[in-house]
Image (cartoon, grey):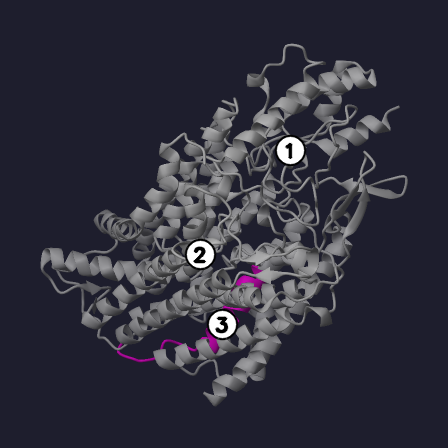
Amino acid sequence: MRRDLVTSVIAVLALTALLGIAYPLVITGVSQVAFPGKADGSLIKRDGKVVGSRLIGQDFRGERRYFQGRPSTATKYAADATAFTNLGPNSRDARDTFRKSLRSYLARERPYDRGLIPAQVPIDAVTSSASGIDPQISRANALIQAHRIAAVRDLSLQHVRKLIDDKTDGRSLGVLGEPGVNVLELNLALDGRR
Amino acid sequence: MLEGWLQIALFLVVLTALVPVLGGYMARVFTGERVFLTPLVAPLERLLYRLLRVDPEEGQDWKRYARSLLVLSTLFWLALYLILRTQTLHPWNPGGFHSGTWDVTFNTTSSFLTNTNWQFYGGETTMTYFSQMAGLAVQNFVSAAVGIVVVIALIRGIIGRSGKSLGNFWSDLVRTLLYILLPISVIGALVLVSQGVIQNLSGYTAVHTLVGGNQVIAQGPVASQEVIKELGTNGGGFFNVNSAHPFENASGLTNFLEMLFILMIPAALTYTYGRMVGNRRQGWAIFSAMLILFVIGVSVAYLAEQHGTPAQHLAGIHHGGNLEGKEQRFGIANTALWASITTVTSCGAVNGAFESLTGLGGAVPQANLSMSEVVFGGVGTGLYSMLIFVIIAVFIGGLMVGRTPEYLGKKIGAREVKLASLGALFTPLTVLLTSGASVATAAGRQSISVAGPNGFSENFYAYLSQANNNGSAWAGFTGYVQPDAGNLGAKGVHLADIMGGLGMVFARYAPILFVLAIAGALAGKKVAPAGAGTMRTDNPTFVALLIGVIVLVGALTFFPALLLGPVVQSLTTNLF
């Protein structure tokens, strides 16, 4: 028993030093040298100021000159206090939230995409993501919003579609995950061309 | 749709291909053979033995093996509690966080010690980087290693030739950490960083958004913790939304790798087992039983999620399946696959919201947990729990053909069967007692956030997950009220925190003791040569029998609870 106690005390200290201090610090050091941008969160700077991260979605508040990300009903794109919505399959709140999201999507896009009917609204446009900071939307969603962006920014639809193509992340290695359009990068590209 | 099935199939192929490679490697580590890492790791290994003052060659019988394990776990429990309660003194605390309340800390400490990683706290709003690295992540390594060494001790008991020794706990622990968990973590962490998972000690980043708003982006040493959280089937997220957070899980590729990290050791241990008992078919038989049950679950979950939910249909959205609580880059297939992986193993990390799954889709995690984490299961814990069911299946098979049951040449006597039954029933009993006590009292029900069957599931799943040392959640269930970030003014919910914490501790260590006792009992038995009357345990008949026993025990125990939660939800279109 005494031997076990002594050994355990030393083990707690030694393993904490090795696995809890040395290991993460070495990984941090190597990462900061080898992958500095990515280790720090893939931050994007414009005019020397950080305007976001390519991995973290941002709230564009329904402004018409910007592509809009997915609804973030629980956290409003807070990236320092993430949370699930926890809206269940048989939840009244879920139904009401979906209805509201669908209505506001149609209200925003229909003036520019006259034929748009509810059955064409992509599912990612009316559901909250898990993280609440999903950086992507589906291509179908972006292509609908393209009508509005082209009209508001006085661009050709073709040009906006090309920008969407540029900012689409395909499946990793061509097979893994789902393709998606990076909303922040797309909006930065729109702002960047004047 | 086709792409989804293709990705699921690809994952299974890669996993199966990894099994003999990693499994063979682990067998060599535990039989003391030379491996390619020996020249690099052996000096550090010897240094640790000298520091710890242990002789790695000294054999321990089951009681001494268990005693070393329990003493170390107790001291680590105290150390972690101390770390989490002294947050104001920590270095690397850019958020200036205070300590959590005593009851939540009791729950969190018990949770990480037992490889559960149930989280009543949100990482980025309550934990200092020091707590994450030196407190929580250390337990991710150690609790995983403890699970692995127990199954290795059991294997030694099964193959032991009339000796008493199960090996040396300290040497098994050190070798697991240095030869298996740490090397894979180092490589895995760097690969994750190269794909966008963050690793820094900076403060949170203030951002001026394009529309003139402010956003604060949480940072931290994530990758080093992410990889071991998965590799050790721990599951505790650095961030509150766990592996749904883009900084924990940045792309389809990181998602694929992280799913592999979760499942590779539990799957490969079956091969390690086959190799160590000298009959690889025994290992593949167990792997097959696990794989069959796993594939059924994944398929049901994926099909169910493509159907969408009643709430969605009543809002006039009839297409696209259920994407609520799921990330665009993972989609339905990878969220369903992950949900199955994380619940057949005792991992509990999530890349989507369980509470938002469809009724039938949500039945899959609940059914997986109801099978007591034997389908792959946690690292080590899964295989030893499975071997308990193997003993029970052998016993039942023996009764049916009227012969004395024996397994791998060892007679299974009354003592082994009693211990195995205790081991198989202890966790389900804990689940039923704690979830029942919670849902029957006002003090328990205050943790539930929604009405109707999903509220029942929140409560049932909370105790199911904790007692099975899984850690995933119907996350509306709360044990913690935090008005501001950083633990200021926080209040714990006593009953949920303490009963859950006790459930985790008892359902972790009692089965470990039963398993080590079985190992001790088996180690002393002589090996009888297999005869014509020996029931084979490496053929499809036995695999079917084993699956039958697992499903029967799980179903008989939990069917009523599953009816009240997910089954009701998948049968009704009513809203609550």
Real-space CA distance between mark 3 and mark 1, rounded to the nearest whole angstrom: 47 Å
Magenta extent: B161-184
Amino acid type of the residue that numbered disc 1 sits on in the rendered structure: Pro
The tag on residue B173 is: 3
- Measured as percent of width and height from the top left, residue B147 is found at 44, 65
Q: Which residue is mark 2?
A: B442
- Measured as percent of width and height from the top left, residue B40 is found at 60, 68
> Crowding at label 1, few (<14), some or many (≥20) Cα neighbours within 10 Å?
many
The tag on residue B412 is: none
Both on one chain, marks 2 and 3?
A: yes
Dominant secondary-structure state across the stretch colored magenta: helix
Q: Nearer the viewer, mark 3 or mark 1?
A: 1
Amino acid type of the residue that numbered disc 3 sits on in the rendered structure: Leu
The tag on residue A71 is: 1
> Crowding at label 3, few (<14), some or many (≥20) Cα neighbours within 10 Å?
many
Mark 3 vs 1: CB contact within 8 A = no
Provide the chain ID for the residue under circle 3: B
* Residue B137 highlighted magenta (yes or no): no
Mark 2 vs 3: CB contact within 8 A = no
Q: Is residue B220 above or below residue A8?
A: above
Amino acid type of the residue that numbered disc 2 sits on in the rendered structure: Ala
Provide the chain ID for the residue under circle 2: B
Circle 3 sits in a helix, a strand or a loop, which is it?
A: helix
* Residue B175 highlighted magenta (yes or no): yes
